Amino acid sequence: MENQLAKSAEERTFQYQDSLPSLPVPSLEESLKRYLESVKPFANEEEYKKTEEIVQKFKNGIGGELHEKLLERAKGKRNWLEEWWLNVAYLDVRMPSQLNVNFAGPAPYIEHYWPPKEGTQLERGSINLWHNLNYWQLLRKEKVPVHKVGNTPLDMSQFRMLFSTCKVPGITRDSVMSYFRTESEGHTPSHIAVLCRGRVFVFDAIQEGCLITPPEILRQLTYIHQKCHSEPDGPGIAALTSEERTRWAKAREYLVSLDPENLTMLEKIQSSLLVYSIEDGSPHVTPEDYSQVTTMLLTGDPTVRWGDKSYNLISFANGVFGCNCDHAPYDAMIMVNISHYIDEKILENEGRWKGSENVRDIPLPEELIFTVDEKVLDDINQAKAQYLKQASDLQIFVYAFTSFGKKLTKKMRLHPDTFVQLALQLAYYRLHGCPGCCYETAMTRYFYHGRTETVRSCTVEAVRWCQSMQNPYASLLERQQKMLQAFAKHNKMMKDCSTGKGFDRHLLGLSLIAKEEGLPIPELFTDPVFSKSGGGGNFVLSTSLIGYFRIQGVVAPMVHNGYGFFYHIRDNRFVVACTAWKSCPETDAEKLIEQIFHAFHDMIQLMNTAHL
């Protein structure tokens, strides 16, 4: 990171924003062709014929008109999708977002200088926070290196949403408030909010114009920890953020009507750099098994996370860390980036603070004491009850596969991400006896404010390969050929989707134009095959590569009978996380991982034996 920083001394984080290309609108013909191709595994001959007719009718009729209107819209915007996507994917969603939308992930420090150890929570926390504050300063000074593919800069706008950003509930639609400013743009909030045992505290990270040091942060954390552990618990206002969105919006309105000071305090939490959560639990964790800590990060105590905050940094009593983040303002790559930076810093400094132990006379943290009444306390209890009920239904397993990793797959000229995606297809096929419609995230950051596109990993080629693996009469050579065809198809799709040639966001745009114009929903979107193949947010497998660093994360499944599947790839291991709902009798996250690990071995064996 340091070298990168030196190299990019002349480049500013956000300097290319104005010159990035606009998000293109793909050709209607291409999108519909790709869509038809993607539904094949989920339709019998008769259904497919019907879908083909529907698509043809759409192309020659209403679809063409909607496409023209979309092109018109795109003329006036650098990103025609941005506002729509934020609203449809996040802000209009009414179900509780903390469990269903947020992502959470464990920090990897347990693999080196910070193994679980009781009594280290506050000291490690002060060092961890200090590294976070340094990253915040790099961002303010625009010294975080611009992400590039080759020499092509990628959109960096999501980094503005990492600090001092919060979702605010609305009756029908939420909004995102971001208070972050770079140094050249002016003043930005510099306080941290700390949640502990149902209480809320704030303190400033800047004193006399410079950052407070780890010993000074430690003094603030110790003060809060001692106070909360020697006095009664607070009301746990934060639990309200875990509620269904409209209910939380109403509860918030009521809270503000009780006392205008309540609004001031809510705004202090919203504008804080980040929320630092002090948890009392000590989750079990090893480099090979992150299941329990990840479960506690995503489904832990709702009174010590602010579910709407873009960054909750969570600390446990045994000195283990992680985060829980609202997904609306940014995608996980941003969190991966800062987490990797902090991991490197902790490694570099051997997990210690090597500077001055001197502590200046800085103001003690201020407690935010809300005015509450019976109704607010009732709302909090109700929020906690619904949250804990749903949380207890979520199954989360995170295991490391340690037999090999990307070194071996690359040696065999197999793309490591595609390797995992195809293993997942085979595992699902073996476990459920049918193909599973699958969403893999592709990033579209080549374009201005680009976020994501859907790669539909369950291709005709992947299904043919899965069938050959289950067919005892298929030769090794046939299986290998089919596997390589599936690889080639997936690699091409990923490239297309990243360069603006996907079709899912395009179809979404067309359906939203129809809605905005008050037109009836086109038949394309009501055709049963549309949702059977994953359309309209119905993907049974919701998946994402988290990257090639030590960073891991998870999200709940997209549908009740589905799985969330998230993984990162290292030289000598694959770390995979799987989520499912216990109340769905057909799904089992642990069994799926077991099948994936089998598939990894089978795929390598296939390459080895077919070569002979």
Image: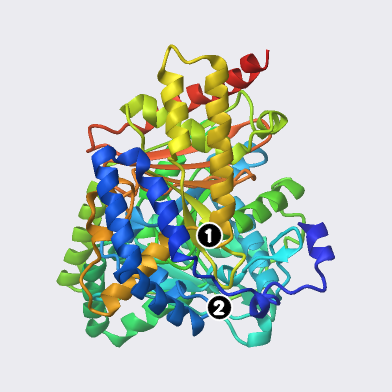
Residue indicated by mark 2: 180
Q: Quadrant of residue 55?
A: bottom left
* SS for callout 1: loop
Residue indicated by mark 1: 501
Q: What residue type is labelled 1?
A: Lys
Q: What residue type is labelled 2?
A: Phe
Mark 2 or mark 1: name the one nearer the start of the chain.
2
The quarter of the rendered structure image containing the C terminus is top right
For the residues labelled 2 and 1, the Cα–Cα distance comes to 33 Å
Tell me the residue at 65%/52% (across/down).
340
- Residue 385 in the image: state x and y as whole percent: 21, 53
Could one spot residue 281 in this view of the protein? Answer: no
* SS for callout 2: loop
> In the figure, is residue 79 to the left or right of 100?
right
> In the figure, is residue 497 to the left or right of 70?
right
- Residue 189 in the image: state x and y as whole percent: 55, 79
Tell me the residue at 47%/28% (across/down).
465
Label 1 packing within 10 angstroms: few (<14), some (14-19), many (20+)? many
Q: Is residue 157 above or below residue 188?
A: above
- Residue 122 in the image: state x and y as whole percent: 55, 53
- Residue 499 in the image: state x and y as whole percent: 59, 60
Q: In which quarter of the image is residue 242?
A: bottom left
Which is closer to the viewer, label 2 or label 1?
A: 1
Check the image and tell me how it is coloured: rainbow
Q: In which quarter of the image is residue 229?
A: bottom left
Question: In front: 115, or 107?
Answer: 107
Label 2 packing within 10 angstroms: few (<14), some (14-19), many (20+)? many
Question: In front: 522, or 351?
Answer: 522
Tell me the residue at 30%/33% (across/down).
587
Question: In front: 495, or 569?
Answer: 495
The quarter of the rendered structure image containing the N terminus is bottom right
